[in-house]
Structure formats: C-alpha cells, structure tokens
Amino acid sequence: MRDMTFKAFAVTNEIDLNKIAIHCGIPKKFTWEQPLILRGSSLYSILGENLDESKMVLVFSFGSVVFINLTHPDMVLTFLKYLQTFEPDIDLKNKDRYTDDYSLHIQETGHIELTDEYVVVPKFDDFYPELISTVIAKSVALEKTEEQLGKIHDKLETMIDRLERGKLRIGNKELARTTAKIVRHEYNTLAYIMILDKPDITWSSSTANDFYDQMTEFFELNDRYKILKSKTDILYNIMDGFSTISHSIRGLFVEWIIVILIAFEIGLTIFQILGWLP
C-alpha cells in the first residue's frame, strides 16, 4: 500500500450529508457522527474525472471536508463549489483559512510514529483513512471555533471598556445577541464537532481505538475542547454580570420614578391643603 495524503478544510458550521448522499445516489441515512465517503462513480459525477479508489473525499456534518490523495487545487475548488450548492454560506474566497495537511506512511516498523505532518504505521488497515480524516477534520473545525470565540471575547472587551467609562446601560437586544453567539459557539463545539464522540469502528476494534486515542491526544483535541469549554463558562459568568448590572440600573431607574411620583403626589396634596390649588 502506497502512502496517502490528506488535506482538511473547515468551510462552514454544518453540512447536511443526506442531501448530498441523495444527489450522489447513495441509499443511506447518515447520522451526525458518520462521515459521507465519496469515491469512484460518486466522485466522477461531481468532478467529471475517473479516479482510482485510493482517491476519496470525506464530508463531515460539522462543516469539515477532507480530501485523500486529491491535492490538485482545481479539483478541490470544483468539489467545494459543488458543496456550496447545498450550503450557500460556504465562503470559497476564504476556503484556505482553516486547513491542515497530513500524510500516512507505511513502513515495516514495530511501532506507530506520530508527528505534526505525518504518521508512520507498520502495516495498512482499512480504518486508517477514516480515523486520520476524522481527527484532522475535528482539528480544523476546532481552529475555526477558537477564532470565533476570540471574536466574542473582543465584543465583550468593548462592552467592558464602556463600563469602565461609566456607560453602565446595556440594551437587552445587545445582551441577547451576545449571549446567542456564546450559545451558538458552545452548540457548534459540543453538538456538531462532537469532540467527545468516537467513530463506530473504534468500538469494534481495539487497534482502531488505540490509534484514534493516540491521534486525538497528539492533536490535543480533548485539551483544546476543555479550554474552549472553560472559556465559554467564563463568558457566561461575564454575561451574568452584565445582565445583573443592567437589571440593577433599570430597577434603580424605576425606583426613582416611583419616588418622584410619590413626591409629586404629596406636593399636590400639600398645595391643596394650603389652598394654593383648587
């Protein structure tokens, strides 16, 4: 078995695999944890070229795409344009923003060697392409999510600056929009990328499970997820603080309005007693 090359892209937050499967004539219902694997006739219908079985594309529901032994830029762009017909929010101009390259090498060694650019295994097994693709697909999706979290942090920093300048009032709409971004970020990470979930093959093969664990540990997927989760919790705490301040200010304003109305009512009563008012 010859070496294999992998190129992963994170192009959107969600991809409906079943729509693509129906279009490619694949009679299968896909769940979130299963990648759509396209090769042979399925790829021919999209790219218009006959390709051998070693060339394939894996599409993941959490918005990542992995090309195996398909590195030609025109083919990659053609496939992503095809994908865009199902997911219009895919930005082709920035398709290389979240990407990673990796390789699988087969050598008769007694152990697995993992590096940032490639993995060396003693012999080929069918599960290697899917597991490697899954790990690097999650890795680039996490990279995309990490940047989105940074943007939320920047937004909160602006709100904190306003508080420091004494501008204490924050609108309900602004609070709601920022909270929605945090919830969406957490939902994309936990529900779509499914960092804590493992591919089905790992439950039936101890070798596959061990390899997947080594890959996820090397790419620090669990650690990166925990960091994102802790940062998200901090964001929620900050938003609770903003909400408390905003509600306190509104409550104080209402209290002052009540005091003023009561004072006005007392003043009217006094004026009437003194005969200054009819």
Image (cartoon, grey):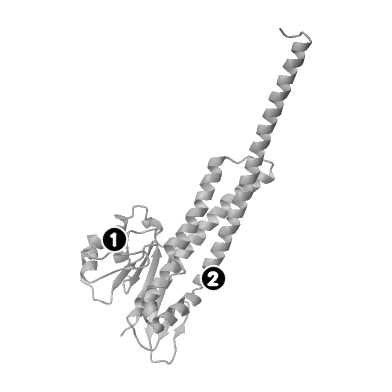
Q: Nearer the viewer, residue 120 or 75?
A: 120
Q: Quadrant of the N terminus?
A: bottom left
Q: Residue furthest right?
A: 274
| Residue wearing tag 1 | 18
Report if residue 14 is visible in the image: yes
Q: Residues within 10 Å of mark 1 (few under 14, many from 20)?
A: some
Q: Nearer the viewer, residue 177 or 92?
A: 177
| Residue wearing tag 2 | 223
When asked about the image quadrant of residue 55, the answer is bottom left
* In this picture, residue 180 sits left or right of residue 67: right
Q: Position of residue 78 (x, y in %)?
A: 28, 61
Q: Is residue 151 above or below residue 165?
A: below
Q: Nearer the viewer, residue 98 or 132?
A: 132
**Amino acid type shown at disc 2:** Asp
When asked about the image quadrant of residue 135, the answer is bottom left
The secondary element bearing badge 2 is classed as helix
Q: Position of residue 171 (x, y in %)?
A: 57, 40
* In this picture, residue 174 sits left or right of residue 129: right
**Amino acid type shown at disc 1:** Asn
Which mark is first along the chain, 2 or 1?
Answer: 1
Q: Position of residue 164 (x, y in %)?
A: 69, 46
Q: Residue at x 76, y 9 (%)?
A: 276
Q: Residue at x 61, y 45 (%)?
A: 243
Q: Is residue 192 above or below residue 172?
A: below
Count up the numbered dots: 2
Q: Residues within 10 Å of mark 2 (few under 14, many from 20)?
A: few
Q: Quadrant of the C terminus?
A: top right
